[in-house]
């Protein structure tokens, strides 16, 4: 009986722990890379070596396949040592992590996937967390063991971007698996999803400077007058010369940017569609101003498909054109980038603000399986003000994940470091873009525990105050708004009380700075609206000094999309002289 029990226990433990990678500073393992390999494999191997050394103070050698010893290995990419590793089911940026005997094989669907397989191994099986530019959590272990591994995953979104300044550096972007054009990712991290131009390209395609004088008919007829410009004016999309010039320009862009897979052909910012008889006839027939746009874009995409079958043409569905056309479908090489229009706090699904966004998205997903979303995540008129959108944002991303969307960009403060809850929002979004089914509260918890350490519980309590506000069904927000309408004085008072307590928990200067960065939005409300939040003239100069110190420590340069922080601070100093 006893013998049987022991053998059962051994069997159980050997199935739970398949291998010991490192123990007490010793390892038999090596990291094997293919003899011929792209730069990303070297980057991935060094990231793996670095983190394993940090975890257990043991350095695994990186060796080319032909120089590898007989001992067990973590194998990156294809190797003669492993056969029958099936990656055919993976889609863009997908990863596969598999035990074969004592070896572990890490493979990607593409070069980025190869690098991501290392990060997923570190996150999923070794507890590493890539929280922010200034914070990676690495658990220290005497022994590093792994179970038998057979894991594969492909993210539902092939394009994942947080348009936030702090998300751009290559290292954090790669670790958080962000692959947008604004990241500084290069060949060493498997490249990125590049676009040219980024968006609003009508103005670049048919330059008003070059054409308007002799050919006003190329541009929008608005209120009986031909109008050109980069904003609130478009092109006359039924003019055959416009199509010809635009097509030639797109082909030229492709030749000038051979590495860019996606060429943008999209409307200028604002409104200003063409009201000429021909354009309006199509819009009326299609029941949407996207009708003339999509017919124009499809015609260009057909020419591109002939000559460059691996290129994509992207167009916006934005402002006046979010409703899909009734008759025309996007051609196979066309990507629709639909711009978010819905409540930040309650999500577009459950709020009257932007109620037509979900039906529009559903209809687009019926017409095409190539939809990217441009999602808004900050208050563009007040980057620093409290913005209780964490719950609504997570809800929206989950919705995208289950409604045929395959690329998402969330636009935050892209102009400079910081911004209200910048690090948490970036981590939350990057995790949900990789896996929208992750529970947002679990992501929040791991972020706060890692980023705020002993003050985590207080910070969580502060975030709960924000959540409670967003439950208020009478307050909505989208894009740019006056935050005094959505931030009651109680949030500032209670929030500062909780965060002062958080600050008192630790002497760690880095964590104190992070907590003060959370206080910045509350101080911003007091300084901007002293009469609403009860800031008196005597206290204000001192508060400006505290505010300036946090701004300086964190290099925060923008207060909103159009205004530099120093300019705003100068106004505050004039308003509250010492
Ligand atoms: Zn027209
Ligand atoms: Zn709402």
Image (cartoon, grey):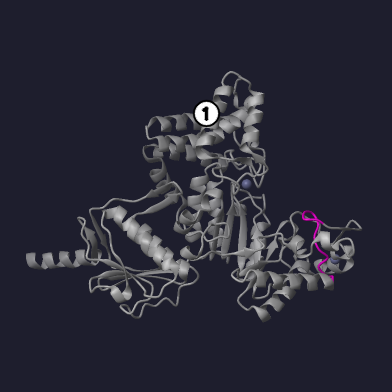
Residue most toward the left? 2
When asked about the image quadrant of residue 338, the answer is bottom right
Query: Where does label 1 land, which residue?
Result: 546
Residue at the image point whose x is 54% and y is 57% from the top? 183
Residue at the image point whose x is 70% and y is 74% from the top? 301
In this picture, residue 105 sits left or right of residue 531: left
x%, y% of residue 142?
Answer: 23, 53
When asked about the image quadrant of residue 380, the answer is top right
- Of residues 122 and 203, the one drawn nearer to the viewer in this rendering: 203
Question: Is 230 covered by the magenta stretch?
Answer: yes
Asked if ligand 2 lies within 8 A of label 1, the reply is no
Magenta segment range? 229-239
The image quadrant in which ligand 1 is located: bottom right
In this picture, residue 233 sits left or right of residue 537: right
Q: Secondary structure at mark 1?
A: helix
- Of residues 568 and 379, the one drawn nearer to the viewer in this rendering: 568
x%, y% of residue 539?
Answer: 56, 21
Residue most toward the right? 224
Q: Is residue 13 visible?
A: yes
Residue at the image point whose x is 79% and y is 71% from the top? 245
Q: Is residue 517 above or below residue 527?
A: below
Q: Main secondary structure of the magenta part?
A: loop
Question: Is 50 covered by the magenta stretch?
Answer: no
Residue at the image point whose x is 83% and y is 65% from the top? 236
x%, y% of residue 271?
Answer: 78, 55
In this picture, residue 506 sits left or right of residue 278: left
Q: Is residue 445 above or below residue 202?
A: above
């Amino acid at each position: 009986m006893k013998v049987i029990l022991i053998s059962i226990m051994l069997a159980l433990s050997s199935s739970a722990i398949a291998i010991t990678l490192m123990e007490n500073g010793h390892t038999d393992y090596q990291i094997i890379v293919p003899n011929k390999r792209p730069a990303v494999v070297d980057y991935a191997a060094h990231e793996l070596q670095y983190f394993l050394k940090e975890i257990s103070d043991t350095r695994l050698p990186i060796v080319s396949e032909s120089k590898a010893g007989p001992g067990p290995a973590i194998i990156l990419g294809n190797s003669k040592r492993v056969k029958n590793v099936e990656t055919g089911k993976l889609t863009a940026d997908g990863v596969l992590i598999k035990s074969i005997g004592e070896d572990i094989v890490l493979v990607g669907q593409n070069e980025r996937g190869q690098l991501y397989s290392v990060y997923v191994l570190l996150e999923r099986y070794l507890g590493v967390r890539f929280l922010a530019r200034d914070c990676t959590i690495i658990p220290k272990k005497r022994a590093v063991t792994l179970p038998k591994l057979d894991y594969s995953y492909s993210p539902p979104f092939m394009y994942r971007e947080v348009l936030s300044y702090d998300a751009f550096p290559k290292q954090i972007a790669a670790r958080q698996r962000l692959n947008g054009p604004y990241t500084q990712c290069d060949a060493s991290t498997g490249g990125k999803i590049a676009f040219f131009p980024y968006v609003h390209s009508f103005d670049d395609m048919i330059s008003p400077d070059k054409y308007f004088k002799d050919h006003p008919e190329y541009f929008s007829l608005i209120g009986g007058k031909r109008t050109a410009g980069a904003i609130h004016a478009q092109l006359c999309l039924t003019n055959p010369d416009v199509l010809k010039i635009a097509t030639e320009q797109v082909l030229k862009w492709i030749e000038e940017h051979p590495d860019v897979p996606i060429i943008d052909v999209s409307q200028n910012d604002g409104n200003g569609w063409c009201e000429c008889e021909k354009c309006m006839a199509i819009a009326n027939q299609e029941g949407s101003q996207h009708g003339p746009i999509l017919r124009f874009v499809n015609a260009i995409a057909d020419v591109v498909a002939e000559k460059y079958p691996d290129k994509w043409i992207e167009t916006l569905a934005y402002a006046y054109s979010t409703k899909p056309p009734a008759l025309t479908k996007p051609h196979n090489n066309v990507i629709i980038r639909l711009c978010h229009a819905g409540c930040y706090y309650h999500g577009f699904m459950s709020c009257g603000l932007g109620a037509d966004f979900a039906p529009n998205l559903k209809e687009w997903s019926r017409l095409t399986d190539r939809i990217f979303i441009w999602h808004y995540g900050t208050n563009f008129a007040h980057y620093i003000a409290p913005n209780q959108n964490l719950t609504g944002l997570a809800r929206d991303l989950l919705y995208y994940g289950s409604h045929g969307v395959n690329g998402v960009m969330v636009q935050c403060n892209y102009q400079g470091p910081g911004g209200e809850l910048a690090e948490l929002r970036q981590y939350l979004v990057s995790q949900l873009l990789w896996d929208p089914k992750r529970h947002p509260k679990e992501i929040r918890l791991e972020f706060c525990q890692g980023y705020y350490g002993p003050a985590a519980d207080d910070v969580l309590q502060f975030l709960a105050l924000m959540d409670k506000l967003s439950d208020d069904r009478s307050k909505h927000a989208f894009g740019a708004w006056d935050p005094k309408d959505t931030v009651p004085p109680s949030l500032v008072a209670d929030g500062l009380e909780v965060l002062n307590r958080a600050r008192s928990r630790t002497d760690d200067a880095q964590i104190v700075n992070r907590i003060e960065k959370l206080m910045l939005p509350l101080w911003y409300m007091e300084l901007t609206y002293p009469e609403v939040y009860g800031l008196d003239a005597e206290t204000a100069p001192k508060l400006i000094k505290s505010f300036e110190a946090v701004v300086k420590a964190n290099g925060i340069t923008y207060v909103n999309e159009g205004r530099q922080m120093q300019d705003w601070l100068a106004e505050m100093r004039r308003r509250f002289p010492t």
